[in-house]
Image (cartoon, helix red, strand yellow):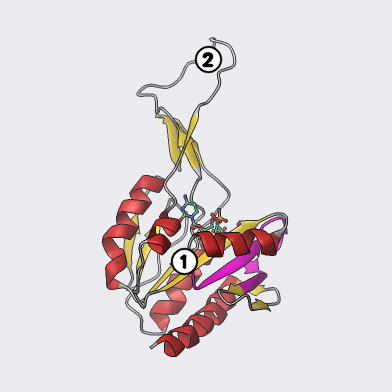
Amino acid sequence: LEPLDPVRYMSNRSSGKMGYALAKAARRRGAKVTLVSGPTALKPPRDVTLCLVKTAEEMRQAVLAECRQYDVIIKAAAVLDWRPKETAEHKIKKGRGVQTLELVENPDILAELGCSRGNSPCILVGFAAETQDLIANAQEKLKKKNLDLIVVNDVSREDAGFEADTNAVKILYRDGHLEELPLMPKEEVAEQLLDRIKSLREKSL
Ligand code: PMT
């Protein structure tokens, strides 16, 4: 989230369910896990290192500090693309008419990881939250952010994407291969994704 003043902020509908399911599933498989999480009502999984952040810049700092230790980085977080240019020190008062909110761009954490990865064997996985032209938009993000795979998430559906307990995703690989998974609980999506990531990793070793 991005604060506007001490009582208001910009945010989005992400509940954290998808990210937490991934962290839990990876831990259950025996991985060492750091979960970098924005604000959520969820209970953190056991035995993971939890790194709580609020803003995109805080998430960036946490991810960059941790990333070198890891063989796999999965970015399921819905990072705000913009933040208010100014955060007011005191509550903004009404009575001055409608105000215009000036926004500035946030850092793109995943693009920064992808563009600086060099020959690192680390597997980099992104999510693409889309409401239209799903595959074309996801393909562009995969390329621009230099990812190994991207999970295409149609967030216009009620039973998938934000807040739902279930998800229906497509997995787009670097070589253009596209795999469609049926609707299933987010915990099962996490398992299926980790299976795909495991075989990518085995191939790259
Ligand atoms: O949390 P839930 O309620 O369970 O919902 C799950 C989800 C819909 C949030 C999740 O499945 C999902 O789709 N996450 C990605 C949301 C998103 O921000 O998508 P994007 O298309 O805007 O971003 C593409 C990728 O770049 C993402 O991996 C994102 O983490 C990353 N990104 C985006 C912007 C930014 N400034 N920095 C980033 O690292």
| The quarter of the displayed image where residue 140 is located | bottom right
Amino acid at circle 1: Tyr
The answer to whether mark 1 and mark 2 are in CB contact below 8 A is no
Instruction: Please report the residue visible at 48 percent of the width from the left and 72 percent of the height from the top.
Output: 22
Is residue 56 shown left or right of residue 144? left
SS category of the residue bearing label 2: loop
Q: Nearer the viewer, residue 179 or 40?
A: 179
Which is more N-terminal, label 2 or label 1? 1
Quadrant of the rendering where the N terminus is positioned: top left
Residue 201 is one of the magenta-drawn residues: no
Query: In this rendering, is residue 197 above or below 142?
Result: below
| The quarter of the displayed image where residue 137 is located | bottom right
**Location of residue 202 in the rendering, given as x and y in whole percent from the top left corner:** 43, 89
Disc marking residue 94: 2
**Location of residue 104 in the rendering, given as x and y in whole percent from the top left corner:** 46, 34
Label 1 within 8 A of ligand 1 by Cβ: yes
Residue 156 is one of the magenta-drawn residues: yes
Measured in 3D between alpha carbons, the distance from the residue under mark 1 to the one under mark 2, in whole angstroms, is 38 Å
Q: Tell me the magenta residue range.
A: 146-171
**Location of residue 5 in the rendering, given as x and y in whole percent from the top left corner:** 42, 28
How many labels sit on residues?
A: 2
Residue 165: in sight, yes or no? no
Q: Nearer the viewer, residue 8 or 72?
A: 72
Quadrant of the rendering where the C terminus is positioned: bottom left
Instruction: Return the residue at label 1.
Output: 20
Q: Residue furthest top?
A: 96
Residues packed near mark 2 inside 10 Å, few (<14), some (14 to 19) or many (20 plus): few
Instruction: Please report the residue visible at 39 percent of the width from the left and 24 percent of the height from the top.
Output: 88
Amino acid at circle 2: Lys
Is residue 99 shown left or right of residue 31? right
